[in-house]
Image: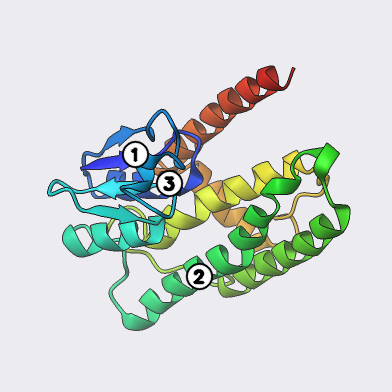
């Protein structure tokens, strides 16, 4: 199977964590030279985003959540989901909260990363939503999330790269406060995931790739 992504993509990182947990070999390739909006890539994925999984039979599966669900359904063991329905629901809730109430405002802030074109009112409004999302996630993680048979759960594939992106975008916006600081469950969880034998290296690779990406972007702007 091929995973079309970039080394700095936190959404591709979700899939890489799952693949490592299930001991799957994925060939990671970059989008075509023209990028995700090129005709070549849009012919595979008209959504125009990464990651995109290409199966051995040529089936193209977009969206990290759909890819994770596919890998879990096809490669049953070790499972990324806990055994009991209530426990699975807790994992699903954590993922939904992250994507709908944390990642959504973070992504909407991408056009405002440049101080020259930043709308401070929009930043303030989205930052409020972002903080509310973090508070909601912390609420549902007062009790540690259930474990799965694999070394990580689906939530552990999704949450750490998302919190990593959250911290990165906060720095780029000049947010001085640590947004996780008010939420002990999130602080504890993220610290533990950074030291996790599967998750930690993926986060380290993200940081390294993003550093290179930022350096190239800075050179282009001068």
Determine crowd level at label 2: few under 14, some 14-19, many 20+ residues with C-alpha closer than 10 A: some
Q: CA distance from mark 3 to mark 2?
A: 19 Å
Question: Closer to the camera, 171 or 179?
Answer: 171
Q: Are marks 2 and 1 in contact (CB under 8 Å)?
A: no
Sequence-earlier tag: 3 or 1 = 1
Residue 179, quarter of the rendered image: bottom right
Residue at left offset 37%, top offset 60%? 153
Asked whether, in this view, residue 15 is left or right of residue 168, the answer is left
Name the secondary structure under disc 2: helix
Viewer-side label of 2, 1: 1
Determine crowd level at label 1: few under 14, some 14-19, many 20+ residues with C-alpha closer than 10 A: some
Viewer-side label of 3, 1: 1
Name the secondary structure under disc 1: helix
Q: CA distance from mark 3 to mark 1?
A: 14 Å
Q: Quadrant of the N terminus?
A: top left
Q: CA distance from mark 2 to mark 1?
A: 31 Å
| Circle number at residue 40 | 1
Name the secondary structure under disc 3: loop
Viewer-side label of 3, 2: 3
Residue 174, percent from left and from top: 81, 42
Residue at left offset 57%, top offset 27%? 213
Is residue 110 visible to the viewer in this orientation of the structure?
yes
Determine crowd level at label 3: few under 14, some 14-19, many 20+ residues with C-alpha closer than 10 A: many
- Would you place residue 95 above or below residue 43 in this image? below
Query: What residue sits right under mark 3 in the picture?
Result: 50
Residue at left offset 68%, top offset 45%? 169
Residue 121, percent from left and from top: 87, 59
Query: What residue sits right under mark 2 in the picture?
Result: 96
Q: Quadrant of the C terminus?
A: top right
Is residue 174 visible to the viewer in this orientation of the structure?
no
């Amino acid at each position: 199977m091929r995973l079309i992504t970039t080394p700095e993509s936190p959404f591709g990182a979700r899939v890489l964590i799952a693949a490592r947990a299930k001991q799957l070999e994925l060939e990671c390739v970059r989008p075509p030279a023209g990028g995700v909006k090129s005709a070549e890539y849009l012919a595979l994925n008209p959504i125009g985003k990464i990651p995109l999984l290409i199966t051995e039979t040529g089936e193209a599966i977009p969206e990290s959540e759909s890819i994770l669900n596919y890998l879990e359904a096809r490669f049953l063991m070790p499972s990324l989901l806990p055994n009991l329905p209530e426990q699975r629901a807790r994992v699903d809730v954590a993922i939904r909260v992250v994507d709908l109430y944390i990642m959504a405002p973070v992504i909407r802030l991408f056009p405002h990363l440049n101080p020259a074109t930043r709308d401070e009112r929009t930043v303030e409004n989205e930052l409020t939503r972002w903080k509310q999302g973090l508070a909601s996630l912390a609420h549902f993680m007062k009790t540690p999330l259930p474990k799965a048979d694999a070394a990580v759960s689906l939530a552990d594939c999704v949450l750490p790269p998302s919190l990593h992106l959250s911290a990165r975008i906060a720095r780029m916006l000049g947010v001085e406060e640590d947004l996780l600081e008010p939420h002990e469950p999130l602080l504890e969880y993220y610290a533990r995931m950074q030291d996790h034998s599967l998750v930690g290296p993926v986060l380290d690779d993200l940081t390294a790739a993003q550093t290179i990406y930022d350096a190239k972007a800075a050179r282009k702007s001068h």
